[in-house]
Image (tube, rainbow, N blue to C red):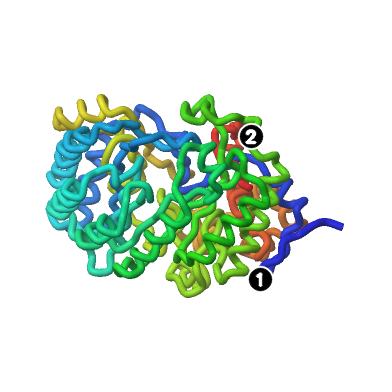
Amino acid sequence: MSQAIHAPDTLLPVELLQRFDVPGPRYTSYPTADRFVEAFNGEDYRRALQQRAEGAQVGGKKPLSVYVHIPFCESVCYYCACNKIITKHHERGAEYLDVLEAEIALHRQVLGESVNVSQMHFGGGSPTFLSDAELARLMAALQRCFKLASDAEVSIEVDPRTADRGRLAHLRAIGFNRISFGVQDFDPDVQKAVHRVQSLEMVTELMRAARELGFESINADLIYGLPKQTPESFARTIRQMSELRPDRIALYSYAHLPARFKPQRRIDASQLPPAQHRIDMLSSAIAGFMGHGYSYIGMDHFALHDDALAQAKRQGRLHRNFQGYSTQPDCDLVALGVSSIGRMGATYSQNAKTIPEYYDAIRQGQFAIQRGLALTRDDLLRRAVIMALMCQGRLEFESVELAHLVKVPEYFRQELESLRPYEEMGLVTMEPGAIQITARGWFFVRAIAMSFDKYLQADRTRERFSRII
């Protein structure tokens, strides 16, 4: 008899988890960032900005999302795959801010002033590498170009080792209303193995302070598949995190890619948990969080039942962007800072990945775009299909056909046929004129979406992606 985990409205046999323990895209965009090309440059990005500005003059100003990348960290976490710079020289922050302000000014020249923003996020690296004064300076610079909506989500990623109650109070005072703590695991042995030691007591105190200071949402990140993790130790972390009651939890699968990410070479691969243990960890995490009052949002996101994200999931109003699932309507994204990725109209773009290249371009008065993509008609169609599946769990053929002037059964004949095995496994229901992902299938939505990825159909090398499970 197969083992299974129990959760509301679903049953997950371990055999299914094992079957889908394969790499695949996270689909924070389609096409995915690995498909960007260097032929797309700063001038292409400027034209996309101009088209937005001209459209705003005619049809009203739709809100923007803004992402700011702060690359600096004081110490390296061995698992990390982010673009970061390890340094204890905090004076580097001031120089970085000078260039960020110049990049913001470039956007103001094209977009104009007081552009409405409904979502702003600081990520890294560690944004709290910057001093309180530097963070205030950066927020002031952003507000000279962008006008935050009264209900805007303004969030920041916080390394618990770089913060205390006073720092959180300052973040709240300068406008942040959402906060995300990088936790990963509470087990001391695991923390030592990945070079990120922070106590349960430290995180507990910070979360308590964040609530008392009035942050509207508190998020926490966890990772399973790290060295020295066991199903038993991770179950303890799941229980401890559930008792802390953050509003949202992101549970990521560790992707060990030492050839691509140099810090991971410091991890002893022999200490990584075997595949079966990783599956056990995921099983216990899903059951544990749902048993403690969390809704499974999709992929690696959980939220308390009364959280806006859980409500959006129930009401079919989920959206997805480069930060993951969101309640914010689909909108353009201005991405600031080294290596940051943005979206403008039917284009994606990424800034230079190294500080010297990024500084050089901005100081010459140019956008620092190093690569990007102008989406084709087929890209836009497939993006609509994949995002409908990833966000609503349902694809209505008629809506896609009207928007893109195609016949879904004809255009996607091969893709629809490839879904038959998923239907036999109870993951999707093929209706006349629609595809419905089942309650069980929602746990494997990445695999289902991959069926419509034209680039993966042509390229089966997926090891560059994290694992679906």
On the image, the x and y values in percent for residue 341 come to 35, 41
What residue is drawn where x is 54% and y is 53%? 251
Task: Determine whether, in the image, residue 213 is placed left or right of residue 104.
Answer: right
Question: Label 1 sits on what residue type?
Answer: Pro
| 438 shown above or below 108 | below
What residue is drawn where x is 59% and y is 38%? 227
Rendered image: mark on residue 8: 1
| Nearer to the camera, 381 or 84 | 84
Which residue in the protein does label 2 denote? 271
**Alpha-carbon span between mark 1 and mark 2:** 34 Å
Label 1: which secondary element: loop
Task: Determine whether, in the image, residue 426 is placed left or right of residue 181.
Answer: right
Most extreme residue toward the right is 1
Contact? badges 1 and 2 (CB < 8 Å): no
Label 2: which secondary element: helix
What residue is drawn where x is 58% and y is 61%? 239
Rendered image: mark on residue 409: none
On the image, the x and y values in percent for residue 302 come to 52, 62
Task: Determine whether, in the image, residue 357 is placed left or right of residue 145.
Answer: right
Q: How crowded is mark 2: few (under 14 residues within 10 Å), some or many (20 or more)?
A: some
| Nearer to the camera, 313 or 183 | 183
Q: Can I make out residue 269 in this image?
A: yes
Question: Label 2 sits on what residue type?
Answer: Gln
For the image, the number of numbered tags is 2
Mark found first going from the N terminus, 1 or 2: 1
On the image, the x and y values in percent for residue 83 come to 38, 35
Quadrant assignment for the N terminus: bottom right
